[in-house]
Amino acid sequence: DDGGFAISIGNRDPKTLRFAIDGYMFAEKRGVEPATGLAIGLRKAKKSAATIREERYRADGCEIDNPMNPDWNIRFKSSLLKGDLAPDPTYTRRDPSAVIQVNGKYYVWYSYSLTHDTKKLAPWDLNDLYFATSTDGETWEEQGPAVTRGPESSFDHRSVFTTEIFVHDGVYYLIYQAAGDVDGIYNRNVIGMAKSESPDGPWTKVDEPVLRPTYTNEQYFDNNAVHDPCLIHYRDKFYLYYKGECICFEDEDCQRWCNPCCGLKKQVKWGVAIADHPTGPFIKSEFNPITNTGHEVMVWKYGTGIAILQHQDGPEAKTIQYAEDGVNFEIMGSAIDMPEAAGLFRPNDPENTPHGGIEWGLSHVLKWNAGPKGWMYIQKYQKVK
Ligand code: AAL
């Protein structure tokens, strides 16, 4: 009845009942009398504001709300970086984390590989997480690896990539995509995490993945992959925003979950999973998917709610949105020349304006004319005043 799955385990005394919204990450549920034998509840998902809008687009056409709100509409420009992060076709650096400032120094983490490594199946394959520092945000010094691939047969053996930094109570968390084998490069990856007392490391990995795709034979927005994790401390909880990707089983539900409406090629939706502690356990929201548009996740706190930018892929591409509850997002305005895979500069003391969390940051650029899988470098983006 709570919109998830329950399992009752064995004949142990006391009997245990575990519960999972996604049918996978079972956590103990107290105060409920377990059934005898196996009990499975049906998923009774709630619809997010974005899903209600998407149903309207499918039924009535693709006219999206356009509030033309001057306080929210935004435009960006970009520029090249200097120092070690200046474009260099030998190295592929991509998917930068947020930029943070510690003791006057800027830090960024990113996916790193050699562009010409012919064993790579994709630019994010066979990657490690590197980091760089800067005193002005323009000239960067690469410091080397922060988190590297795990040993054979570990969940992050094949590649660690697409990371985000999160700081809470003086502890630094890197949350990242992980692939144990080639399947995790395009399909079923997991989300891993590492912790440190200092942005300079050393980093200790959390033993188990903190998020996985929803392993189900039903059609669902994240039944194939969970990408682009981003952790936000909000309303005394830890909100893990992520992008889900879908395997289409070609049944009638496939249209709803995996196929974009409004003429766009790829359907990408975001979800959120919420925990009481920064390392989980994360319970996927019953409102998922919370967007039906997106790609790389861009999320920041504003006022008493959460703001997002919706990049490519989906009916509401190039919009800026806000949700008072961090879940039910409304379109607030439009975004022009959006950065790709943006890592937002997160000021220690952001201005309380809609754009206080996205004044500048780093993003990535793909050049297909170098290396077998393309060459990618990191650049700077800024809001145009
Ligand atoms: C990016 C991100 C994720 C995907 C791949 C690398 O755009 O969405 O990180 O897995 O592409």
Image (cartoon, rainbow, N blue to C red):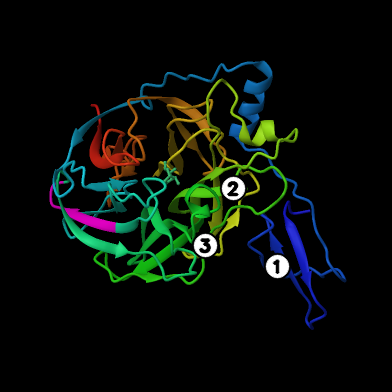
Of tags 3 and 2, which is closer to the observer?
Answer: 2
Residue 224 visible in this rendered orientation of the protein: yes
**Mark 1 touching mark 2, by CB under 8 A?**
no
The disc, 3 or 1, on the residue closer to the chain's N-terminal end is 1
Tell me the tag on residue 313. Answer: none
Tell me if 59 is positioned left or right of 206 in this view: right
- Residue hosting label 2: 224
Classify mark 1: residues with Cα within 10 Å, few (<14), some (14-19) or many (20+).
Answer: some
x then y, percent, for residue 302: 40, 41
- Residue hosting label 1: 29
x then y, percent, for residue 360: 26, 38
Q: Name the outermost residue toward the bottom.
A: 13
Ligand 1 occupies quarter: top left
**Mark 3 touching mark 2, by CB under 8 A?**
no
The disc, 3 or 2, on the residue closer to the chain's N-terminal end is 3
Up-down relation of residue 299 to residue 155 (above or below): above
Up-down relation of residue 170 to residue 284 (above or below): below
- The amino acid beneath tag 3 is Val
Image quadrant occupied by the C terminus: top left
What span is colored magenta in the figure? 130-136
- Residue hosting label 3: 210
- The amino acid beneath tag 1 is Lys
Secondary structure under the numbered disc 3 in the rendered image: loop
